[in-house]
Image (spheres, rainbow, N blue to C red):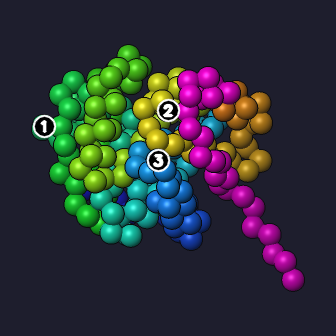
C-alpha cells in the first residue's frame, strides 16, 4: 500500500513537525513509539494522524499509520488491521515512507479489544517503527477506549468552535478510566487572526 501525501494538505506542517518532535523527545524514561490519535466529536477525519505519519517519514523515521476508521474491504494479500490481529506480522516499512494500513471490512469492536491488537503494535514497534493509530471519533464510538491502553500515548483532536466541550470531557474521562496516557490536545480549524 502506498502513501498519499495529499492527505495532509489541510494540516499546517510546522505545527505537525512540532508535534512530531514533542513525541520523539518527550519520553525520556519511557519512550513514546505508539500513538493513538482520536478526533473528538467529528464527522470527518481531521488529518492530524495522516500529517503526523508523514512528518515522521519526512524526518527519516520508519512509520506505520494504522487507520482503523477505514473499514472498506481490502484486496488480495494487502495487509489490514483485521488480518494482522488474527495473524500478527511485521510490516514491510521503509524509512522515510510511511505505510498506511486500513482497518479492513472484518474489523470490529471485539477485535480492537483483543490482545491481538497489542501484538500488532508491539511487533512493529520492536522493529523500530513509530506506530500511529487513528480511530473513529470519540465519544460516539468506543474504539479509542479499546485502543488507548495498548499504546504509549494518546492525543485528542478538537475542532475550534465545533467540538462540544461536554463531548471532549466525556471522551477524556472515558480514556482516563482505562488508564490512557494522555499526551495532550491538538486544536484544528482555528480561525486565522492577524495582529499588527
Circle 1 residue = 76
Q: CA distance from mark 1 to mark 3?
A: 38 Å
Q: Magenta stretch containing residue 118, yes or no?
A: no
17 to the left or right of 162: left
Range of residues picked out in magenta: 173-196
Which is nearer the N-term, disc 3 or disc 2?
3
Q: Height in image: 111 above or below 135?
A: above
Image quadrant assignment for residue 140 = top right
Q: CA distance from mark 3 to mark 2?
A: 16 Å
Q: Magenta stretch containing residue 190, yes or no?
A: yes
Considering every residue shown, the one lying at the far front of the view is 29
Which is nearer the N-term, disc 1 or disc 3?
3
Rendered location of residue 48, percent (x, y): 52, 53
Q: Which mark is residue 148?
A: 2
Discs 1/3, front: 3
Q: Which mark is residue 139?
A: none
Discs 3/2, front: 3
Q: Are marks 2 and 1 in contact (CB under 8 Å)?
A: no
Circle 3 residue = 30
Amino acid at each position: 500500500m502506498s502513501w498519499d501525501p495529499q492527505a495532509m494538505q489541510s494540516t499546517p506542517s510546522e505545527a505537525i513537525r512540532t508535534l512530531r518532535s514533542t513525541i520523539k523527545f518527550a519520553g525520556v524514561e519511557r519512550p513514546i513509539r505508539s500513538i493513538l490519535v482520536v478526533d473528538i466529536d467529528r464527522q470527518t477525519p481531521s488529518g492530524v494522524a495522516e500529517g503526523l505519519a508523514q512528518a515522521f517519514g519526512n524526518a527519516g523515521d520508519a512509520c506505520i499509520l494504522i487507520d482503523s476508521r477505514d473499514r472498506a474491504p481490502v484486496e488480495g494479500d494487502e495487509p489490514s488491521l483485521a488480518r494482522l490481529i488474527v495473524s500478527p506480522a511485521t510490516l514491510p516499512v521503509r524509512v522515510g515512507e510511511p505505510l498506511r494500513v486500513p482497518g479492513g471490512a472484518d474489523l470490529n469492536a471485539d477485535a480492537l479489544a483483543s490482545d491481538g491488537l497489542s501484538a500488532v503494535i508491539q511487533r512493529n514497534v520492536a522493529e523500530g517503527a513509530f506506530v500511529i493509530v487513528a480511530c473513529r471519533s470519540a465519544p460516539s464510538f468506543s474504539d479509542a477506549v479499546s485502543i488507548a491502553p495498548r499504546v504509549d500515548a494518546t492525543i485528542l483532536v478538537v475542532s475550534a468552535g465545533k467540538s462540544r466541550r461536554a463531548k471532549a470531557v466525556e471522551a477524556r474521562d472515558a480514556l482516563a478510566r482505562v488508564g490512557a496516557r494522555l499526551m495532550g490536545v491538538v486544536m484544528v480549524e482555528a480561525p486565522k487572526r492577524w495582529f499588527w
